[in-house]
């Protein structure tokens, strides 16, 4: 029975993770589709991405209140309904400013709550490093399948077809809610190892560092599709490069799922940071579709690899569950901020500025995370 419960929590955690964050991975194609339908520029595309991700950040602030107070199954059901209604309304929307409001509302009431609940579920399992890797792998598999269907999706005449699979995966959460845990219970091993009033401040610092670091992939991935269009490649070639690059990125989370916390969390994050920056620099120098695909794949591999250990760091330092609720806010607000700022920078200086922006955010984020890594004990990975 215990084994069945663990498998159920894993399934629920993965579904929540996918439903709460999949839009982030298909945003390049979605934003280009919006550019075609609404005739907007890169700065306006960044505004749509920012509205979506900031909405998920707002949901995290709300989670600081409802976590431990309200029934989680009820919250998840409300979030699923909000996702479906919001995606349907956005699908038929014809006004750009109304669309921004709809995406922010959908993220706040729907995607954000589901994303937070994913960390709540995974954070109480015996080995979150591995399960976070599995959850992220599920996101990559799903979004790769969606990106591979770009042809029929882009032919949807009455609205952006990218929102249809987003609503569908949210509905899949409902039957898995039977495995939702009742509440946050800090494992005793955390209390033994992280003694003192400052322990949870370290978790908050780690959340801030992750937010700054997440602005680096946000700055690049938001405009990966738009940047690729300057290479004189066809829409089909670019779509294939994005789909393959995203799919190969599964290796990053899969390696993290296999590796767990064998070599602590600081080295995977540092290696992932350096290689993330190098992959963006290499992308800027490529013109052939094969090289473009390879650099996109490398970017996704190291993004998916490093972020697993940053999330696990927060879980390992958190004693109250409050910082855990902020994981999604850190990722999404950071991702949104990176996309928003890079949009204006691209309008002013062109796509070549992406390398500098990515490197600046990634290095600053890593420096802040180092404060938490100094106290990281790896306690959560010990009980297997």
Image (tube, grey):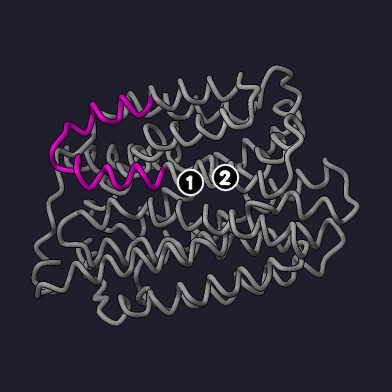
User: Can you give x and y, in whole percent of width and height, for residue 134 in the image?
Assistant: 42, 51
Residue 379 at x, y = what percent? 21, 70
63 falls in the magenta region: yes
Q: Which residue is mark 2?
A: 49
Q: Quadrant of the N terminus?
A: top left
Q: Is residue 289 above or below residue 91?
A: below
Residue found at x 37% / y 43%: 115
Q: Quarter of the image containing the C terminus?
A: bottom left
Q: What residue does disc 1 label?
A: 53
Q: Nearer the viewer, residue 208 or 263?
A: 208
Q: Assign a secondary structure to mark 2.
A: helix
**Picture quadrant where residue 110 is located:** top left
Seen at 32% across and 47% down, the residue is: 60
Viewed as shown, does residue 322 lie left or right of 97? left
**Badge 2: residue crowd in 10 Å (few <14, some 14–19, many ≥20):** many
Residue 118 numbered mark, or none: none
Give the spatial CA distance, label 2 vs label 1.
6 Å
């Amino acid at each position: 029975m215990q084994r069945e419960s663990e498998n159920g929590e894993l399934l629920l955690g993965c579904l929540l993770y996918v439903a709460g964050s999949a839009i982030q991975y298909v945003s390049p194609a979605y934003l280009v589709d919006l550019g075609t339908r609404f005739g907007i520029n890169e700065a306006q595309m960044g505004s749509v991405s920012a509205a979506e991700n900031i909405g998920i950040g707002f949901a995290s602030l709300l989670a600081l209140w409802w976590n431990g107070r309200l029934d989680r199954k009820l919250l998840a059901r409300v979030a699923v309904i909000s996702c479906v209604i919001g995606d349907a309304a956005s699908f038929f929307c014809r006004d750009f400013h109304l669309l921004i409001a709809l995406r922010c509302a959908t993220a706040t009431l729907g995607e954000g709550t589901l994303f937070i609940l994913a960390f709540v579920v995974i954070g109480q399992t015996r080995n979150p490093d591995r399960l976070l890797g599995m959850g992220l792998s599920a996101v990559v598999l799903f979004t790769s399948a969606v990106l591979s269907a770009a042809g029929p999706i882009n032919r949807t005449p009455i609205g952006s077809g990218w929102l249809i699979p987003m609503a569908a995966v949210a509905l899949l959460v409902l039957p898995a809610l039977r495995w939702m845990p009742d509440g946050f219970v800090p494992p005793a091993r955390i209390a033994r190892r992280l003694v003192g009033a400052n322990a949870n401040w370290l978790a908050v610092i780690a959340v801030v560092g992750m937010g700054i670091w997440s602005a680096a992939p946000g700055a690049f991935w938001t405009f990966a599709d738009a940047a690729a269009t300057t290479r004189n490649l066809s829409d089909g070639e670019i779509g294939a490069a994005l789909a393959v690059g995203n799919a190969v990125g599964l290796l990053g989370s899969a390696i993290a799922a296999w590796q767990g916390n064998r070599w602590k969390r600081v080295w995977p994050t540092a290696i992932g940071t350096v290689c993330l920056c190098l992959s963006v620099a290499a992308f800027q120098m490529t013109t052939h579709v094969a090289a473009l695909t390879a650099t996109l794949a490398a970017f996704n591999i190291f993004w998916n690899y490093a972020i697993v250990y940053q999330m696990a760091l927060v879980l390992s330092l958190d004693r109250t569950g409050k910082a855990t609720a902020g994981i999604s806010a850190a990722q999404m607000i950071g991702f949104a901020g990176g996309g928003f700022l890079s949009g204006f920078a691209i309008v002013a200086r062109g796509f070549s500025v992406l390398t500098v922006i990515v490197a600046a955010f990634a290095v600053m984020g890593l420096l802040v995370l180092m404060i938490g890594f100094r106290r990281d004990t790896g306690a959560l990975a010990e009980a297997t």
